[in-house]
Image (spheres, rainbow, N blue to C red):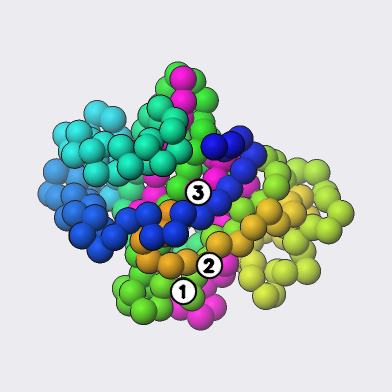
Amino acid sequence: MQIENQAGCVKNMFDEQQISGLLKLFSSKKLVDTGGNGGGTKTVGIHQKAPLFPLFEKTFMTPLRNYFNEDLKLVFAMYADCRIPFDIHDDCQEHIEQKLPGKPWLSCLVPLSVDNDVDKTHYASTVVFNETEHTVEKDNNCVHLYEEKFSHVTIDRLKGVTIKEEYNWHRGDLVWWYSPLMHTSCHFKKFKSKQMLVCHTYIL
């Protein structure tokens, strides 16, 4: 499957039994709140040296590798309870900071709930852009969507991106994208928080 410069959504990648197992893993006292990068976001993370990594590899990384037919390596994964949306960004920084080999490759998230209510999951969405940077102004950019979707985003960043795809959330789906691609969420005008599993990978 082509991953470079692409994005997509795998419907019903994880069933309720699998989700329950992953939530149990991320609730373990062996993991700690990593604080996250966005104000108000609680994240509990795991990486290759974490004591629970073998279990995460079996329950999450193996299905991921099998679906994409890629030898994906974990940069990090986390459970996130996000209360303030992130600005437009890519997913390469953690790979750089950990001084990992290879290159950032595939990022993904599994929607779980909105306002801790599974019936509201569809209120949220993830937007992936065509660009790997936002510094050059583009024709057909996203400034006109500021009030409708992106009131949390820096205007100058909206000038430098064009939408590849918007993925409306559904619990258990796998929303994925090429890690260097710019992306963000819709703003939080219809809700106060969203819950998800997030995973960043690399290849050698």
Question: Neighbour class for label 1 at 10 Å: few (<14), some, many (≥20)?
Answer: some
Q: Quadrant of residue 185?
A: bottom right
Quadrant, the N terminus: top right
Percent x, y of residue 55: 19, 39
Q: Residue at 61% of width from left, 62% of height from top?
A: 166
Circles 1 and 3: CB atoms closer than 8 Å? no
Q: Amino acid at mark 1?
A: His
Circles 2 and 1: CB atoms closer than 8 Å? yes
> What residue is disc 3 on?
176
Question: Neighbour class for label 2 at 10 Å: few (<14), some, many (≥20)?
Answer: some
Q: Residue at 30% of width from left, 37% of height from top?
A: 62
> What residue is disc 1 on?
122
Q: Quadrant of residue 119?
A: bottom left
Q: Is 85 left, or right, of 60 in this rendering?
A: right
Q: Quadrant of residue 3?
A: top right
Camera-side residue of 166 and 51: 166
**Would you say residue 194 sits in the magenta stretch?**
yes
Q: Secondary structure at mark 3?
A: strand
Check the image and report above or below for 158 versus 73.
below
Q: Which region is colored magenta?
A: 175-204
> What residue is disc 2 on?
168
Q: Amino acid at mark 2?
A: Asn
Q: Residue at 30% of width from left, 44% of height from top?
A: 60
